[in-house]
Image (cartoon, grey):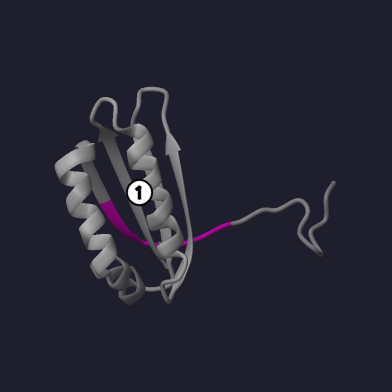
Amino acid sequence: MIVTVFRSRLMPDVRDDYLALAARMNELAKTMPGYISHKGFFADDGERVTVVEFESEEGMRAWRMHPEHRAAQKKARETYYASYSAQICDVKREAKFDRNAKGQAAE
């Protein structure tokens, strides 16, 4: 699995427009082969963090290069972002717990 951690800070007064674009990108990402999930959060200090999971690097790369996503990236650099960083990570190990999962004993 490939995980992207995307951190950004927005320019003043662009949050609503940015969120509309982000919502469109979220819907588009869900259609990509190998897509697993994504979640975005705003921290108290204004930083936005988005975590995106793909099954493989090829799926993530296809998403990164999708023409509509490329256009959105360009617009975001020109209009919305004060700064951003992206970290692309290979998952080395994963552990999960779900109290409500079938067969999971809850004590």
Is residue 97 toward the left or the right of residue 39 in the image?
A: right
* Residue 44 image-quadrant placement: top left
Query: Residue at left 40%, top 55%?
Result: 24
Give the image quarter of residue 103: bottom right
Q: Residue 78: within the magenta?
A: no
Q: In the figure, 10 relative to 5: above or below? A: above
Q: Residue furthest left?
A: 78
Mark 1 — residue?
Answer: 21
Q: Is residue 13 above or below residue 48?
A: above
Q: In percent of the image, x 45 and y 71: which residue is there? A: 31
Please give the range of residues in magenta: 87-95
In the image, what residue occupies the spot 33% across and 41% down? 18
Percent coordinates x, y for residue 99 in the rendering: 76, 51
**x%, y% of residue 43?**
41, 29
Q: Is residue 43 visible?
A: yes
Q: How many marks?
A: 1
Residue 92 can be seen, yes or no: no
Left or right side of 29 for 107: right
Residue 50 on image: x %, y %: 39, 46
Q: Residue 84, position in %: x, y?
A: 22, 41
Q: In front: 36, or 25?
A: 25
Judged from the image, the secondary structure of the residue bearing numbered disc 1 is helix
Residue farthest along the top direction in this orientation: 45
- Taking depth in this image into account, of 31 and 83 the one nearest to the observer is 31
Circle 1 Cα neighbour tier, 10 Å, few/some/many (<14 / 14–19 / ≥20): some
Which amino acid type is marked by label 1?
Leu
Q: Quadrant of the N terminus?
A: bottom left
